[in-house]
């Protein structure tokens, strides 16, 4: 399996799909906002980015 095939397989894994669904949902964005000031610096997406990414994730 080449790197590209591995990346594609990982992207389509149930874990990654579930994580992306959570990270882009309102609950996930709220959790990210609450963690904005921690050392790792998680930052929620802008409303425009969320709209585009949620639409792209539906396919």
Image (cartoon, grey):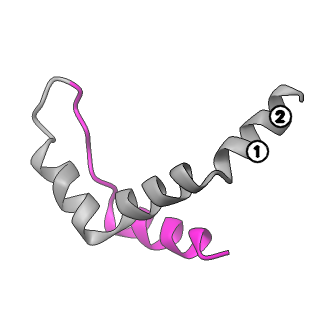
Near-viewer residue (17 or 37): 17
Give the numbered dot on residue 4.
2
The answer to which image quadrant residue 39 occupies is top left
Above or below, 7 against 26 in this view is: above
| Residue 34, image x, y percentages | 10, 49
| Residue 7, image x, y percentages | 73, 37
| Residue 41, image x, y percentages | 22, 32
- As drawn, which residue projects farthest toward the right? 1
> Do the residues under discs 2 and 1 have CB atoms within 8 angstroms?
yes
The answer to which image quadrant residue 55 occupies is bottom right
Q: Which quarter shows the C terminus?
A: bottom right
In the rendered structure, the answer to whether residue 9 lies left or right of residue 32 reads: right
The residue range painted magenta reads 40-59
In the rendered structure, the answer to whether residue 14 lies left or right of residue 32 reads: right
In the rendered structure, the answer to whether residue 5 lies left or right of residue 20 reads: right
Q: Which quarter shows the N terminus?
A: top right
The local secondary structure at tag 1 comes to: helix
Crowding at label 2, few (<14), some or many (≥20) Cα neighbours within 10 Å?
few
- As drawn, which residue projects farthest toward the front? 14
Q: Residue at x 67, y 42 (%)?
A: 10
Residue 35 magenta-highlighted: no
Give the numbered dot on residue 57.
none
The local secondary structure at tag 2 comes to: helix
Above or below, 27 against 36 in this view is: below
* Residue that mark 1 sits on: 8
| Residue 54, image x, y percentages | 49, 71
Q: Residue at x 10, y 35 (%)?
A: 37
Q: Residue at x 34, y 68 (%)?
A: 25
């Amino acid at each position: 399996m080449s790197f590209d095939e591995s990346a594609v397989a990982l992207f389509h894994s149930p874990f990654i799909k579930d994580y992306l669904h959570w990270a882009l949902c309102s609950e996930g964005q709220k959790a990210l906002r609450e963690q904005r000031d921690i050392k790792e610096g998680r930052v929620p997406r802008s409303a425009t980015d969320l709209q585009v990414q949620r639409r792209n994730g539906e396919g």
